Image (spheres, rainbow, N blue to C red):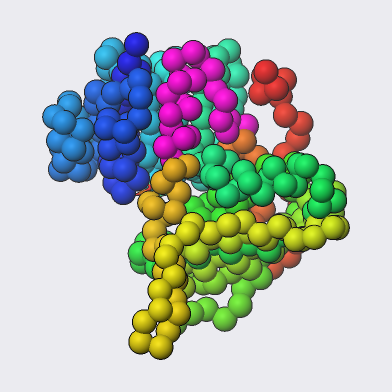
Amino acid sequence: MELKIGVIGCGAIGKEHIKRLQYKLQGCTVVAVSDVMEAGAQAAAELAGGVKYYTDIPSIVNDPEVDALVVCSPGFAHKEAVLAAIAAGKPVFTEKPLATTAADCKDIVDAEMASGRHLVQVGFMRRYDRGYNQVKAILDSGDFGQPLILKCTHRNPEVGTNYDTPMAVHDTAIHEIDVLHWLINDEYVSAQVLMPRTTKYSHPALRDPQIMVLKTKSGVIIDLEVFVNCKFGYDINCEVICEEGVVHMPAPSFPSVRKNGYYSTPIEQSWINRFIDSYDVELQNWVDCAKRGVVEGPTAWDGYVAAVTADALVKSQTTGAEEPILTGDIPAFYLN
Ligand code: NAD
Ligand code: ISE
């Protein structure tokens, strides 16, 4: 049986996901797309091979041919689409973040629990990345003792002028917020943001770079540099300093070349290629699980925990203080 999917939001990642769902992954087919911009919806419908398109959320969610939804609109628009899917009883995969505030994520958690069914998965694809999984296997083996410090970077070559200071948290650092506590099996207790000098390549509404410090329940300190106008490439690094040694996440491999007196290796330029395998594994798993009526990947609760952490970081962007992170206990519904 093919899972018939409707894709909401047909921008950069929407088009990438339409291509992989329609032409690469198994057991699914895109039957409809939707975007508030009609021209974008129409172009995406053609990309999917001439499927139907809509410009509003209720029409695609309630289309009887659509079994499940993939939400790729901007973060501020996720809540409406996810709540509509839950109300229709349809599985929904939403790109990160689940929503842009913890309060909105909590509304989604409450709606999913009230429905009595596991319907929501959040696109935290780094949990499916080979490099992070290799690091996790080493840490979980116990051979390196306890983790003590994490040094991470999340660098983008550049961002548009609509990208502002809070987006460094809920659009960019949200990936590390989710993957790092999963990586070390820990919980965050506080968050702080330090603002170095801003690069000349930024604009008045964006402090860039930023240093984000997260502390965990067991005492680990995470130092995350977010630098979204670094100019030189898409550069994701994660180093874990442990009691018995250091574990460094591998970077994707490129040929090294010798030319004109230089020995050099390219740096990845975009998230599209850096995490291409992770997106494939993530969405194939979601398709397989949606057909069985289960969610194995990051849940709405994971999206909520990430948003509580993000709210603390965004607050610290203004106060400069170490802000507490209080998520409460995981509901029994999400332990199943
Ligand atoms: P984008 O701006 O390129 O595309 C967003 C699209 O959504 C646009 O076509 C826009 O017209 C449409 N849209 C806006 N409001 C809408 C609404 N209410 N209903 C339907 N469509 C609407 O953005 P993007 O880079 O594709 O990002 C989209 C989402 O994917 C964001 O949440 C972003 O954080 C996430 N994302 C995730 C990754 C990842 O690595 N997992 C990478 C890129 C983007
Ligand atoms: C984008 O939305 C992503 O999710 C990318 O992975 C991230 O690197 C980038 O900063 C975001 O804007």
Q: Quadrant of the N terminus?
A: top left
Residue 31: quarter of image: top left
Task: Tell me where residue 32 appears, x and y as whole percent.
Answer: 24, 26
> Residue shown at 67%/18% (left/top)?
336
What x and y, as percent, mark residue 301?
62, 32
Left or right: residue 188 compared with residue 250: right
Against 22, residue 223 (above or below) is below
- Determine the image quadrant of residue 51: top left
Q: Residue furthest front?
A: 258
**Is residue 106 toward the left or the right of residue 31 in the image?**
right
Position of residue 186 measured from the top left corner of the image (x, y, whole percent): 76, 44
Q: Which residues are magenta?
A: 279-301
Query: Does residue 131 appear in this view?
Result: yes
Give ligand 1's quarter of the image: top left
Q: Is residue 295 magenta?
A: yes
Let me know if residue 70 is in the magenta part. no
Q: Is residue 56 above or below residue 333?
A: below
Secondary structure, magenta segment, majority class: helix
Q: Nearer the viewer, residue 101 or 266?
A: 266
Residue at 44% x, 43% y: name it.
277
